[in-house]
Amino acid sequence: MKRKINYADLKELNGEPLGKPGAPVKLNFLPSPEQVRQTLRTIKVTVNLEPSSLDYYRRQARRRGEKPAEIMRRVLQAHALVEA
């Protein structure tokens, strides 16, 4: 990146106006610990998959350096959030 970012042009952050330069900035974009704990809770289930589906997730996991179950969990979570 060759273009220098000029933060003096920034009028607000997360919808809140910024104060004078050097004033403390309140960043409240992180989730609360309770919300993080809720997302970490999982329930163990058994799923029967087609061999081609499992092969796909295994290939994707190998490419990304993850476990197939983690990718499947994220796909199911994203689907559930869209449907909600």
Image (tube, helix red, strand yellow):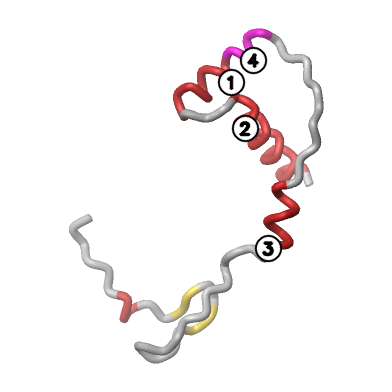
- The residue tagged 4 is 53
Q: Amino acid at mark 2?
A: Glu
Q: Which residues are magenta?
A: 51-55
Of callouts 3 and 1, the N-terminal one: 3
Q: CA distance from mark 4 to mark 1?
A: 6 Å
Residue 33: which disc? Answer: 3
- Figure check: 36 above or below 7: above
Q: Residues within 10 Å of mark 3 (few under 14, many from 20)?
A: few
C-beta proximity under 8 Å, tags 3 and 1 = no
Q: Secondary structure at mark 4?
A: helix
C-beta proximity under 8 Å, tags 4 and 1 = yes
Q: CA distance from mark 2 to mark 1?
A: 10 Å
Q: Amino acid at mark 1?
A: Tyr
Q: How many marks?
A: 4
- The residue tagged 2 is 70
> From the viewer's perspective, is the residue at label 3 or at label 1 nearer?
3
Q: Residues within 10 Å of mark 4 (few under 14, many from 20)?
A: few
- The residue tagged 1 is 57
3 vs 68, nearest the viewer: 68
Q: Which residue is at 52% across, 30% downward?
A: 66
Q: CA distance from mark 3 to mark 1?
A: 31 Å
